[in-house]
Image: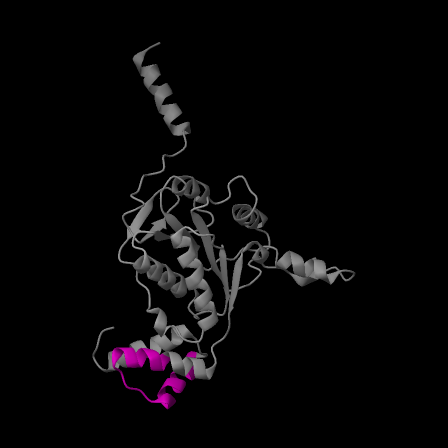
C-alpha cells in the first residue's frame, strides 16, 4: 500500500470522526457561554443588585434560595421562569448566581447555552468537573412542529439516558408557561378538554420550580425607578416617569431601567 494511499485513508477517517470538544478551564470563571463545541469564559458576571430588583419579591426569594442550595451541593430544582417580557427573569438568574458565588467563592458557575447546541456534550463534560453549574437556556420556545426539541428537553429534565448530571441544574426562561406553542382548534378534545391542557403544560410539569412573572403595575414600576434613582443619586418626577412608560407602550422592569438610563444621560453621567 503506497504512502499516498495511506495518507488519503487517514484523511478520510479524520473527516468521519466526531469533532473534538475543545477543553475549557471549568473552575476559572464565574460564567461561560457554550457554543456547542467550546466554552468561552465570562468575567466578571454582570448582574443587578438583588435589593434593586423590585416587584418580584416572591420569585426572587425562591430563585435565590434554589441557586444557593445548588451551590452548597444540596438538592435543588430545575427552574422554569415564565411570563411577561422585561420583568427580570434572566437578570434574576444572573444575580442569584452572583450572590451564591459571593457566599461560597468558586462553588457554582452560570453556563448560557441553547437546546440545539450540543447539550449532551456539555453535560458529559460538566459531569466530570468538581463544581456545580446552572445551565441557562434563555427565551426558550418551540414551534408546534418542533416535537424533537421538546422531547429532548423533557428527556434532559427527567428520565432520559442523557439526563443532566447531579452537579448541573437547568434554568429556562420563556414568555410562555407551556413553552410549546399549541393551536387549540387542532389539539382540544371536546370530550376531555383537560387532556389538552395537560399536554400544553407537559414541559412545565418537568420543572421542580416554575415561577410566573406578571406585568408590572404602576406602583411596582415607580418603586423600581425609585430604588434605582436612590442608588445612583438621581432625581426625577413621577409624571415624567409615567409619561416615559406611556410613550414606550407599557410598564416593566426593563422599561424602568431604560428610564433610569435616560435620567443618567440627561445628567451627563454614566451608570
Q: Is residue 262 in view from this perspective?
A: no
Q: Quadrant of residue 20?
A: top left
Q: Is residue 258 above or below residue 148?
A: below
Residue drawn at point x = 39 percent, y = 43 percent? 126
Quadrant that contains the C terminus: bottom left
Q: Is residue 188 left or right of residue 43?
A: right
Q: 188 or 185, which is in the foreground?
A: 188
158 magenta-colored:
no
Specify the farthest residue to the right. 191
Residue shown at the point (34%, 43%) measured from the top left: 38
Rendered residue at 59%/52% (across/down): 145
Indicate left or right for 137 with 45 as reference. right
* Majority secondary structure in the magenta region: helix
Report x, y in % for residue 227: 34, 79
Q: Start and end of the magenta stretch?
A: 225-248
Relative to 125, residue 76 above or below: below
Residue 216: percent from left, percent from top: 47, 77
Membership of 237 in magenta stretch? yes
Amino acid at each position: 500500500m503506497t504512502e499516498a494511499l495511506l495518507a488519503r485513508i487517514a484523511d478520510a477517517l479524520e473527516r468521519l470522526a466526531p469533532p473534538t470538544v475543545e477543553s475549557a478551564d471549568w473552575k476559572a470563571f464565574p460564567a461561560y457561554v457554550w457554543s456547542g463545541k467550546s466554552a468561552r469564559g465570562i468575567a466578571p458576571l454582570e448582574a443587578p443588585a438583588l435589593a434593586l430588583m423590585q416587584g418580584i419579591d416572591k420569585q426572587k426569594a425562591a430563585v435565590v434560595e434554589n441557586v444557593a442550595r445548588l451551590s452548597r451541593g444540596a438538592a435543588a430544582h430545575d427552574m422554569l421562569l415564565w411570563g411577561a417580557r422585561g420583568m427580570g427573569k434572566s437578570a434574576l438568574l444572573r444575580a442569584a448566581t452572583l450572590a451564591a458565588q459571593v457566599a461560597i467563592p468558586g462553588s457554582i458557575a452560570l453556563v448560557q447555552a441553547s437546546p440545539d447546541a450540543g447539550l449532551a456534550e456539555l453535560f458529559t463534560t460538566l459531569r466530570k468537573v468538581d463544581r456545580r453549574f446552572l445551565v441557562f437556556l434563555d427565551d426558550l420556545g418551540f414551534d408546534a412542529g418542533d416535537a424533537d426539541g421538546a422531547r429532548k428537553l423533557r428527556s434532559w429534565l427527567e428520565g432520559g439516558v442523557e439526563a443532566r448530571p447531579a452537579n448541573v441544574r437547568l434554568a429556562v426562561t420563556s414568555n410562555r408557561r407551556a413553552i410549546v406553542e399549541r393551536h387549540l382548534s387542532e389539539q382540544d378534545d371536546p370530550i376531555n378538554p383537560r387532556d389538552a391542557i395537560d399536554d400544553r403544560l407537559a414541559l412545565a410539569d418537568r420543572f421542580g420550580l416554575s415561577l410566573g412573572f406578571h406585568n408590572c403595575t404602576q406602583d411596582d414600576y415607580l418603586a423600581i425607578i425609585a430604588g434605582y434613582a436612590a442608588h445612583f443619586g438621581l432625581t426625577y418626577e413621577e409624571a415624567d416617569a409615567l409619561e416615559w412608560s406611556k410613550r414606550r407602550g407599557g410598564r416593566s422592569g426593563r422599561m424602568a431601567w431604560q428610564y433610569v438610563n435616560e435620567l443618567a444621560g440627561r445628567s451627563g453621567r454614566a451608570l
